[in-house]
Image (tube, coloured by chain):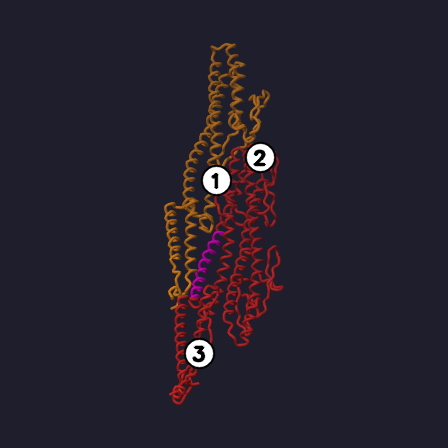
Chain colours: A orange, B red
């Protein structure tokens, strides 16, 4: 059977193939990826787009949580201070109710109570990164202004609103991040400002101090109950952080599974491809240049 | 003629036949590397015998013809395989270029979409912050720019293919005209009963080159060769070639035979591959991008207009310039509509601190567009499709390349020149020549003796 006398095209084709495999192995090692273009693995390439999206969102949620935790912690510590101030007011009130106290002592107590009242307004107007945190969503104006003529009799006017913001801290997981001042400090029937203002007037008039003190106490308890919100919200952000960190790890592992290269295997492939390439070159090189013509005398 | 002169003429016939055989060998050796050359084999038979009395006497050797060894069936198969292989390879080259637009998962349109929605997510914890707002506009701008660039690159590639098409058609015309002129030479020889020999090889080689460009079939006919595409467009008829022309149609170059547009009917050769990518793959990808860009822009604008901007106005305004109504060209023209970060509508109640409308904007990421998929799913599907088209074409090109190689090997085994064979033939012809020459010189001596027969006797 006669064979093709010219083996060169086949040999060159084989050589070209080994060179291609070499290049491919080198590319994978240098990029660390097994999917460098979509045709390397179309399904994986598509999934890697989704994976990157998940990674972006996950780290985005973690960033949002960090920002939210700042707001929550500021609010929480402010309310702590409010609570301390109210405790101070209570002691002053109890003192004022005492029969042994005289008019000038009472006057002194009034001054201290007024200072506490002023402090409360200032605390209620706390800002975090330029935004008033107890104003509902009207965060660019101070929620409370001193107004002795306010019809509520609380001595302050609330200029904020009652809207709340939610921030997504996970897929479909929305966290409410604020409580409006009106709900915290000037709620109907449980207003801290009203109670303080009434206490001041009671001491000034030396009448109904006991009732006023009870009202302050009740308002203080109510406020404490409200602050539970912040503790809960912070807890939620912390457990979500744990979950998101684990998710991030999984997403990163999945990215590696889909498109990463096992370096040891890739190095072996490269070495094999180089060997194949050398062998093909050697085979072509050894191709006999002789034909029968060389041996005719 | 019998006698010594008869013997001489037999020896002379051997000399001349050996000489012609050696010429054939020499021609084969000279053309060992000529593309398309089929080795020639001398067809030698014994001369008709002559009856002398009861004896049958031979009259030497006769060279009937010099035959080119070729397998026409193989050549047809090789042409078909060449058309298939060229088409796949030219399509593959284009597809490989296209897919570089979609190569990275951490950058490019997909990552831009993720980053845009993330910038809105970050805004939600401090909706009036100017830096975060600017971040949203910047992310939107990056997204729009990448859409524009990708669309533009596809368009440029389409333009390059156009140039390629024009050049290839010019090459087709050049080849068909050469084929026609060779055919004329072949016909002229055949009409005087001469063997056209290697002219046929030349013609076959030209036809094979033509197969690399366009699908072409050889249709047997009485007068010369007829070449036509598979849909019947005649390219060569005998010594007449019919040139193809190119003209712009619908923004791309179309191929015409006379007034008939044959662009869509080509099935092989590099032209078919180029046209398939230019007229099917690229428009399909462009259309998907357009639908994605248009859908995103429209949905984002609608969501933005559901709320209040930082000036307290509702509807807040558009973030993207509204795309064309049917989406055509949306990717190339997608632009951010404003440089004012205050236009972004975070607020659902008109206050600067409300983030309620961001939920509407963020919902665009997880809501199906008109094509039935969310924005990121649309993009990942597109990436998968581009990758599949490329890898399938690559696999097909590899296997068609193997088939072509095998056919060419078979052809080589029939028609290829083996230097070893030619060398051994040369030895045989040389020996035959030497032997015949020896016979001639022997007869020469005998003739001398015969002529001098009477002389010797007379001298005694």
Chain letter, disc 1 residue? A
Residue lying at the far front of the rendered structure: B460
- For label 1, the crowd category at 10 Å Cα-Cα, with few meaning under 14, some 14 to 19 and many 20 or more, is many
| Residue B407 in magenta stretch | yes
* Viewer-proximal residue among B456 and A264: B456
Which mark is in front, 1 or 3?
3
Note whether residue A193 is visible: no
Residue A157 location (% of width, % of height): 57, 24
User: On what subunit does the disc labeled 3 rest?
Assistant: B
Is any atom of residue A285 visible in this view? yes
Q: Are marks 1 and 2 on the same chain?
A: no
How many numbered badges does the structure rendering display? 3
Q: Residue B350's spot in the image, x, y percent?
A: 59, 34
Query: Which disc, if any, is residue B349?
Result: 2
- Within the magenta stretch, is there residue A240? no
Q: Residue at x 58, y 55 (%)?
A: B163
Residue B13 marker: 3
- Residue A136, image x and y in percent? 54, 30
Which residue lies under the disc numbered 1?
A: A57
Answer yes or no: are tags 1 and 3 on the same subunit. Answer: no
Whole-Å distance between the Cαs marked 1 and 3?
A: 94 Å
């Amino acid at each position: 059977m006669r064979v093709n006398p010219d083996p060169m095209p086949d040999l060159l084709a084989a050589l070209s193939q080994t060179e291609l495999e070499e290049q491919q192995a080198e590319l994978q090692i240098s990029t660390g990826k097994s999917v460098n273009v979509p045709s390397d693995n179309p399904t994986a390439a598509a999934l890697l787009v989704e994976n990157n999206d998940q990674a972006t969102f996950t780290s985005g949620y973690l960033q949002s949580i960090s920002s939210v935790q700042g707001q929550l912690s500021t609010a929480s510590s402010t309310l702590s201070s409010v609570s301390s101030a109210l405790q101070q007011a209570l002691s002053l009130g109890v003192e004022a109710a005492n029969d042994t106290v005289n008019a000038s002592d009472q006057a002194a107590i009034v001054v201290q109570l007024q200072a506490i009242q002023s402090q409360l307004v200032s605390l209620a107007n706390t800002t975090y990164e330029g935004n008033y945190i107890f104003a509902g969503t009207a965060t660019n104006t101070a929620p409370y202004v001193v107004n002795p003529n306010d019809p509520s009799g609380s001595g302050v006017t609330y200029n904020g609103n009652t809207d709340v913001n939610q921030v997504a801290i996970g897929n479909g997981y929305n966290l409410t991040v604020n409580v409006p001042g009106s709900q915290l400090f000037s709620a109907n029937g449980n207003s801290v400002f009203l109670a303080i203002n009434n206490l001041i007037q009671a001491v000034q008039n030396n009448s109904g101090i006991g009732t006023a003190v009870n009202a302050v106490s009740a308002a203080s308890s109510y406020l404490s109950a409200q602050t539970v919100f912040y503790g809960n919200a912070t807890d939620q952000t912390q457990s979500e952080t744990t979950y998101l960190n684990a998710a991030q790890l999984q997403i990163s592992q999945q990215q590696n599974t889909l498109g990463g290269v096992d370096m040891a295997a890739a190095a072996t492939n490269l070495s094999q491809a180089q060997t194949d390439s050398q062998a093909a070159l050697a085979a072509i090189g050894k191709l006999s240049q002789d034909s029968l013509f060389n041996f005719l005398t | 003629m019998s006698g010594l002169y008869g013997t001489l003429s037999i020896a002379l016939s051997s000399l001349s036949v050996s000489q012609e055989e050696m010429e054939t060998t020499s021609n084969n050796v000279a053309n060992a590397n000529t593309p398309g050359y089929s080795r020639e084999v001398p067809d030698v038979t014994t001369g008709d015998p002559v009856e002398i009395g009861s004896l049958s006497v031979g009259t030497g050797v006769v060279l009937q013809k010099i035959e080119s060894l070729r397998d026409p069936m193989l050549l047809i198969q090789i042409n078909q395989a060449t058309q298939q292989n060229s088409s796949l390879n030219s399509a593959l080259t284009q597809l490989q270029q296209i897919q570089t637009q979609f190569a990275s998962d951490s950058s490019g349109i997909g990552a831009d979409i993720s980053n845009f929605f993330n910038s809105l997510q970050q805004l939600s914890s401090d909706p009036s912050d100017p830096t975060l707002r600017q971040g949203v506009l910047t992310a939107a701008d990056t997204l729009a720019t990448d859409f524009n660039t990708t669309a533009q690159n596809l368009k440029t590639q389409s333009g390059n293919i156009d140039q390629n098409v024009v050049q290839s058609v010019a090459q087709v015309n050049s080849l068909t005209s050469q084929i026609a002129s060779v055919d004329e030479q072949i016909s002229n020889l055949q009409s005087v009963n001469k063997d056209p020999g290697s002219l046929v090889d030349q013609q076959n080689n030209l036809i094979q080159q033509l197969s690399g460009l366009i699908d072409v079939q050889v249709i047997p006919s009485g007068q010369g060769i007829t070449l036509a595409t598979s849909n019947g467009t005649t390219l060569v008829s005998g010594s007449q070639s019919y040139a193809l022309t190119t003209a712009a149609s619908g923004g791309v170059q179309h191929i015409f035979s006379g007034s008939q547009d044959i662009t869509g009917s080509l099935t092989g050769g590099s032209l078919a591959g180029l046209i398939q990518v230019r007229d099917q793959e690229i428009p399909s990808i462009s259309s998907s991008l357009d639908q994605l860009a248009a859908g995103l822009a429209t949905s984002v604008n609608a969501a933005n207009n559901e709320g209040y901007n930082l000036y307290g106005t509702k509807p807040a305004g558009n973030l993207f310039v509204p795309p064309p109504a049917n989406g055509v060209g949306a990717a190339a023209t997608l632009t951010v509509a404003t440089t004012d970060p205050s236009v972004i509508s975070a607020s659902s109640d008109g206050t600067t601190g409300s983030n309620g409308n961001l939920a509407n904007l963020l919902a665009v990421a997880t809501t199906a567009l008109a094509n039935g998929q969310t924005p990121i799913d649309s993009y990942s599907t597109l990436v998968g499709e581009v990758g599949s088209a490329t890898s399938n074409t690559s696999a097909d090109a590899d296997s068609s390349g193997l088939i072509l190689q095998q056919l060419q090997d078979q052809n080589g085994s029939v028609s290829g020149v083996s230097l070893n064979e030619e060398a051994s033939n040369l030895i045989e012809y040389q020996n035959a020549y030497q032997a015949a020459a020896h016979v001639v010189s022997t007869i020469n001596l005998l003739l001398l003796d015969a002529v001098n027969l009477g002389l010797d006797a007379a001298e005694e």
